[in-house]
Amino acid sequence: MGPLLQVEDLSVAYGNVEAVRDVSLTAARGRIVTVIGPNGAGKTTLLAALMGVLPSRGGIRHDGVDVARLAIEERVARGIVLVPEKRELFATMSVDDHLALGAFARRRERGIDALRAEVYRRFPRLLERRRQLAGTLSGGERQMLALGRGLMARPALLMLDEPSLGLAPRVVRDIFTIIAALRDTGVTILLVEQNARAALAIADYGYVLETGRVVLEGDSATLAADARVAATYLGRGHGAMTAG
Amino acid sequence: MDLSIAALLAQDGITNGAIYALLALALVMVFAVTRVILVPSGELLTIGALTLAAFDQGHVPGTVRLVAGAAVLAGVIEAVRRARRGEGRRALAGAALWAGIPLALAALAAWMGPRKLPLAAEVAMALALTGALGPLTWKIVFEPIADASVLVLLIVAVAVHFVLTGLALYFFGAEGSRTPPFSSASFDIGALRVSVQSLLVLATSALAIAALALFFGRTLYGKALHATSVNRLGARLCGISPDFAGALSFALAAVLCAFCGVLIGPITTLYYDSGFIISLKGFVGAIIGGLASYPLAAAGSLFVGLIEAFSSFWASAYKEVIVFTLIIPVLLWRSLVTHHHEEDE
């Protein structure tokens, strides 16, 4: 079996501006692969293109199948799931409803109830608030709900866009612990983060994205030890890597 | 005006208001899910009533040919759309689904036409047949332009209204129809004579509203529609296709409109073009709810019905003028109480 996700020469353009240029990456099964990089490097754009939210050029193969032309819903049905940066929750609907809808693509499959119980076990906080409306949740709870909703779709490839964004440090730790634990369920995770330290700590492999291009890749330990990465993204120095 | 007349007018107003409320709910739902203002709701209402009238007279309703034609068109459109995307076998399956189900309904209706089946069966078939026009309209007209601006969708909806009015004239003719009342009984409470028919209208409207509330609150598909109206991208990320949500909301709305037609049929003689003015009153109710709130839209519609009934007593020539002038203070009030936010497109 080859890697779960194979991206070849992917480019995404907003009008004439190319936000992502010829990016190639692979994600092996059951691994956490992270894409780190500064604000505006094209990380969110990359995930949006992989999900089909934005049109793109280039190859996207998931589980050996070309999915580059499929609609968002068709990718969800194949197990590609995005937990977006803006969460995209339903403000006037309850936590329970979110989980029910998360499994919409799996509505004809068995075991949805067991899956919901499993998600509530991972996120006891959500269980406490199961009748509460999403609009009334705190930032951390909203991120947990977005994650839980994504898990209900039985993802093979779970793409997480900035799960730590806007959260208190203690909550960030909780979220990353949960993400690391998800790997043991066999799901492949593509994690986009500005918080490079936390991302590299749980990832198996990493890519560094700058101005829409991959400038560096490697095992996360190797990346974390890389002097340029350390200087730029781990807070021991200043300036973008390509500038130096 | 004495109390008994006032009570009579109130009864009239509430009966009509209940029907407007159903229309308003259909308008709010379709707008929330698809951003289309369902201008042709009046035609769907008329077609529903005229279909039942045809069954009642032992004819095959013109709706059969209308639905069959639309079904073939929708099937071809779906096949071409899927074939273009390179989905060879699924193109056929999609076409078979979109053409097959409405065609089967039409065939069943054609078989039913000359036979005198019980009223309930005729009503069910009138609802199903007219209901099929909803998703067919979505597939043929709105799905290809689903991402257009609200204004474009509105203009196209007006066009659909004219097309459906013309088709209704062609398929049903210019004569008016009235269906027999479900019950001609009445009873007295004090000085007030209450007709069982208007009680039936009220009760079934309330039932329909309760069923809608259950559908949105309890079923997965209802929640999927709600989710699409709250956050379109969020719903897509759950695997809820906007095309599916659009077709489902149009189906529900068409059944609701046809149901209104069935309820109005025994009260008013309906012609091929009678629906528009009725749907406008539902629209006023929906506007009172800001095209967003179901309870406010229902309450607003009851209010419209009452205003209409009482103005028909005091100034019957100005009845419509008064009802439609109501929209001006309502818009003023809404513009003061709502916070404006630009539509993100």
Image: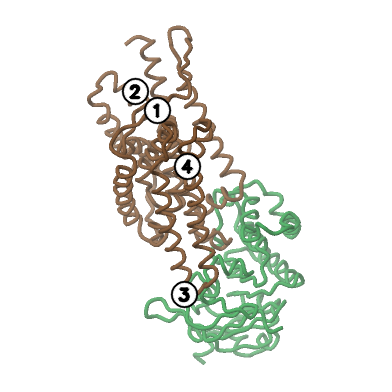
Residue indicated by mark 2? B309
Residue indicated by mark 3? A55
Q: Chain of mark 3?
A: A
Q: Can marks 4 and 3 be said to lie on one chain?
A: no
**Mark 4 is on which residue type?**
Val
Q: Which mark is residue B16?
A: 1
Quadrant location of the C terminus of chain B? bottom left
- Seen in the picture, residue A46 relative to B225 is either above or below; the reply is below
Q: Position of residue A176 (x, y in %)?
A: 69, 69
Cα distance between the residues tagged 2 and 1: 9 Å
Is residue B90 left or right of B314 when viewed as pictured? right
The answer to whether the residues at label 3 and label 2 have Cβ atoms under 8 Å apart is: no
**Mark 1 is on which residue type?**
Asn
Q: Which mark is residue A132?
A: none
Closer to us: B196 or B325: B196
**Mark 2 is on which residue type?**
Ala
Identify which residue is drawn at 65% across, 72% down. A157
Cα distance between the residues tagged 4 and 2: 26 Å
